[in-house]
Amino acid sequence: ARSMKLKQLESLLQDVEPFREPNQMLEQYPTGAHLASRVVAAAHEHGDIEDRAVVDLGVGGGVLTIASMLMGAKKVTGLDLDPNALSLTRENCAAFDPPLEPDLFEARIPRDILKARRGVTREEIRSVDERDASLVGERDEDLPRRSDAETTIEAETSKEKRDDDDDDD
């Protein structure tokens, strides 16, 4: 078990660099070491961290990702709309010895989830894409057409549907 005392976790998280230039339009704000250590410790006490897969939506500087890894998460996946946040998370993870290696993906979370769901119209997806593009100052043609997160969600959804169909037989 890789659990550690709360004060030790908080101390390690003190060195995690927060956003350099938070984008207010994306509602970016740093999660401090004090709060992050307590949130992850509470999740750990409930059995939701150690040897579990953890997803950090809106990873920012990675403090919750890092805390989850330090508390023994089996796998941590971080998603963020902002490529600068992902770069910062990579830098923060690399500062540990040994370096921490979460899976990090750029993803427009509402769009990627909408696309993976059945019955969502192209107009609804386009609306989400346009809103997200305006928040980060991108034009629609600059947006990636298919993200790794979308591909993963679609594959998992297809597998679940096949498994459900097999159960019906």
Image (cartoon, helix red, strand yellow):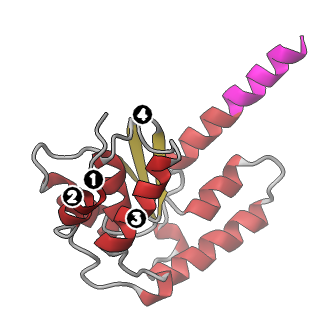
SS at mark 3? Answer: helix
Left or right: residue 164 versus residue 11 is right
CA separation, marks 3 and 2?
11 Å
Identity of the amino acid at label 3? Arg
Please tell me which of labels 3 and 2 falls first in the chain: 2
Please tell me which of labels 4 and 1 falls first in the chain: 1
Please tell me which of labels 1 and 3 falls first in the chain: 1
| C-beta proximity under 8 Å, tags 4 and 3 | no
Q: Give the image location of residue 115, x and y in percent.
A: 68, 53
| C-beta proximity under 8 Å, tags 4 and 2 | no
User: What residue is pinned by disc 2?
Assistant: 8
Which of the labelled discs sits on residue 51, or is there none?
A: 4
SS at mark 4? Answer: loop
| C-beta proximity under 8 Å, tags 2 and 1 | yes
Q: Magenta region's main secondary structure?
A: helix
User: What residue is pinned by disc 1?
Assistant: 5
